Structure formats: C-alpha cells, structure tokens
Amino acid sequence: MVFALLNGSYHRHGGDGSYQRVRSVVWEVLGGCGTEDCKDWWSECPWKPRYPDTRPPASLCWRSETKFVYPRASTAFTWYCDNPRPQKMDIHLAVLPTQHHVLSDKDQNDWLEFITFCFHAKGTPRSHFARQLNNEPIHTILVARLASPTNTVSIVSTVRIFHRTIVPNIRTAGIGAVCTHPSYRKQGLSSKLLDFARQVIADMNAFDCSLLHCAPRFQSFYHQRGWTNTLLVETLVVDMVPTIHDNDTGDYIVQPYAIATDSHLPQLQQLHQTFSGGKIGADIRPKAFSSALMSSYQASIFVATTKAVPETVVGYCSLQYHVRDGCFVWTLCDLGVEKNVPHDVIRRLVAHAMHVQLEQLEQMDTHTHQTVEMPSCCKFLGTEDQHVGHKIDHGWLYYDVLPGSNNSLQKQMESTTIATATRWKIDGF
Ligand SMILES: CC(C)(COP(=O)(O)OP(=O)(O)OC[C@H]1O[C@@H](n2cnc3c(N)ncnc32)[C@H](O)[C@@H]1OP(=O)(O)O)[C@@H](O)C(=O)NCCC(=O)NCCS
C-alpha cells in the first residue's frame, strides 16, 4: 500500500491538478520513472493520455518522515512537492561550510537525510554515514544544489572528500558518499561533482593521491572520471573452526576486548602500527580517529594477553560476520600483533572470537568449519591442511595528485615486490 500525501495548497484548492500530481508521484515511486533507464519519464507516464494538459509533477523537494523503500514503496511516506520542475536546471556546485571542520546542525541533518535517501536501495543506514562524519577528523562535502524559482535550494547530488594517510606516508584524499537524487541521475551531476572534487583536491595542496572504493559496475564510471589506477587488494578465504580454548593452558589468554580499560587503547594503536606499519596501502591512523574506530568496533574486538603480564595486550583482532546463503561468512576487519607472538596464538584468538560471537547468537553448532575472509598479509592464519582460497578486489581506484613526486602511489606500487596492497575493513571508505 502506498500513501502519497501532498502538503499545502495542492490539497486545499481543488482543480489545480493535485490529483494528477499524486498519481504521477505514485507512479514515479513505484518505479515507472526515477530509475536510471527512464530518461523521458513524463512522456512515458501512463496517465498522460487522460490528462494531456497536465504538467510534469513538481520538482521533488522531499522529506521522509517515516521509513520508506525506494523505488518500490512498501510503507507509508510523505512526499512534499513544491514548485514545478524548472525547464532548465539551475545547479550550483558548492562546498558545505564548516567551522573548525564541523558542519552546522542544519547542513549535517539535510546532508544525512539526502544521502540516506539516495543509498536506501542499498540498505546503508543513516547511522553509517553519521558515524563517518563523527569519526573523521576532517572532511569536505561537495554538493550540487538546485535553486528553485522561490529561491529555496535542495541538494540533488553530493561527494565527500576525507583525509587519510596510507603506508608508506601518502597523503590521501578519500572519496565517498557519491550519489545523486534518483530523479536527477544520468544528467552528468556526479561527473560534474567529481571534476569539482579533483579541482578542490588540487587546490588544497595537501594530498599526494586520491583513492576510492567502488563496486565492479561503477569501475568504468570512475575510470572515465580520472581515477585510472587500480590498487589491487587480495582477500584470503581461510577455513577455521570456532573454538573455546581453555584460558588456563599455555602462556597466553584470549578474551573479548570488553574486559579492557582505556589504558589498553594506546596499546591497540601501537599494535596496529607494528603490524600494518610496513604494509603498503594500510591506513596510518591518527590517535583520535583510532579511538573513534575502536569504540565503534568495540563489541567485535578480542585481545590476547600474556599470563605473566595480564594487563599487556600482545595482539588483537576485530571480527564480524554476515550471513550469505544461510552460512556465516566472517571478515577479519582488523588485526594487530607484536612481532614475537606465535601464529598459533593469533589463530586461537580468531577462533575464540568466532566461538564467542556464535554463542551470543545461541548457535549451538559451533564446531564446524567456517570461512574467514582476511587481507593476504594474514596468510599465516591458514595452515596447510586448511583450505585457503583467495579473491582479488579490483575496486580500489586512485590517481596521483602529484604524479612526479616521491610520494606517488603508483611509483610506490611499482617499486614493491608485492603487487597487492593491504586494506582493513575497519578503516571503511
Ligand atoms: C552512480 C551515481 C552516483 C551516478 O550519478 P549520476 O549523477 O547519474 O552520474 P552522471 O550523470 O554523471 O553519470 C552517469 C551516467 O550517465 C551518463 N550521462 C551523463 N550525462 C548524461 C545525459 N545528459 N544524458 C544521458 N546520460 C548521461 C554518464 O555518461 C554516465 O554513464 P557512464 O557511466 O556510462 O559514463 C547514481 O546513480 C547514484 O547515486 N547511485 C546510488 C548511489 C551509489 O550507488 N553510488 C555509487 C557509490 S560507488
């Protein structure tokens, strides 16, 4: 059931075309238009023959008040329409202003609402984008805005630029949140914003390269817009058996991070640096960013300590699962270990994390092999008798902002004997 409610004058004044507007908006929401395939959406509207003089529905100044699914609406929503769609779109590209790198509450809310709407079909929740805004120390948000005749403006497309440093010391402009309102796609808006992003990145004079991650179907889209190089990232698929491990045997204890105190945080940061410091492509995390990540991922973190000095963490992992075709698929989102810790202890740490998480889910069958996906630098977690598969992710794309410089990522990749880079899921993108 779909409810389309138009606010304001459309309801109060009969004979102004509001009924047709409701029908055409409903038609649009049901997927008749607003999809990428339907360019001339009005000419294909099934009700047009009955209402030959009807103008296209109002430009979509929308605000979701209840949860809804686009394009196939399955629940109630309110869609506010305002002025007729301008014949010629008057689009302004802008950087959202910040004070000490913080957006105003209004800009933040409007942006979060917009982006959640655009990614709704993918199911990415608003909290994901809100966390990125809160966790990142510095970000620059670019928007394309449609200026309506009444001078109200609404976002129709956006791109987020965020600051990262990756091993070996490459100042990186991360690109994320690339999206356009469904009714304004295929009109070059994202392309324009990505061109604008390249210009902003160059003007900032603070970056060696720009990096993004995308699904295979978008690779050619970004290639055409200048993210021409591919940073290969290899993922290993290792069979592991979730196990409890007796805490009273051996020299080490493995347990959930929940036991840890704030004093453990610098230890985890140090362990990340020790383990990933030499792995090209991995993030070099500033302290504040690292703390924010660790607290977001706290429930998924497990630590290994020595019995002799129980307050010293010698290794940690962050492990998460999702269910694919009825099976658990685990991802090793992060790992940090001291150099001298035996590999077997790290295997026990991961197996213990799996066991505890399955127990929390009250899954009784915890002793069967399950697959864990991890960056290829964790090869040591697989043993010869375990099946180890692998897949290459071609979705990390970049270009060098300063191609000739020593910090050119392309040069760094060419100079290393290892063709693949390391990226941890916890660092998100
Ligand atoms: C992917 C997405 C961002 C593209 O936004 P967009 O504003 O439609 O992008 P553009 O209009 O610049 O380009 C899209 C395509 O339309 C084409 N196009 C551009 N202007 C056009 C026009 N006037 N007429 C017809 N096609 C046009 C482009 O050439 C491009 O095709 P290509 O990929 O074959 O080169 C948008 O579909 C979206 O928001 N998707 C949901 C969120 C998402 O998945 N984001 C990607 C995250 S990696």
Image: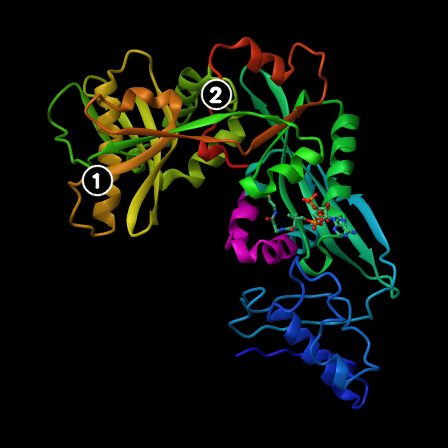
**Is 70 situated above or below 410?**
below
Residue in view at x 83 percent, y 49 percent: 92
Residue 121 belongs to the span the image colors magenta:
yes
407 and 238: which is toward the camera = 238
Marks 1/2: CA–CA distance: 31 Å
Picture residue at 16% right of the left edge, 47% below the top = 365
Q: Nearer the viewer, residue 289 or 151?
A: 151
Q: Is residue 352 left or right of residue 258?
A: left
* Residue 409 in view here: yes
The kind of residue tagged 1 is His
Residue designated by label 2: 420
Q: Which residues are magenta?
A: 112-131
Disc 1 or disc 2, which is closer to the eye?
2
Which secondary structure is most common in the magenta stretch? Answer: helix
Residue 310 shows in this picture: no
Q: Is residue 225 left or right of residue 271?
A: right
- Residue 373 location, x and y as percent? 35, 34
Q: Which residue is mark 1?
A: 355
Q: Earlier in the sequence, mark 1 or mark 2?
A: 1
Residue appearing at x 74%, y 42% in the figure: 191
Report which quarter residue 12 is drawn in: bottom right
Marker disc for residue 256:
none
Picture residue at 82% right of the left edge, 70% below the top: 83
Specify the amino acid type for callout 2. Thr
Secondary element under disc 2, as helix, strand or loop, is loop
- Tell me which corner region of the image, top left, top right, bottom left or bottom right, holds residue 261: top left
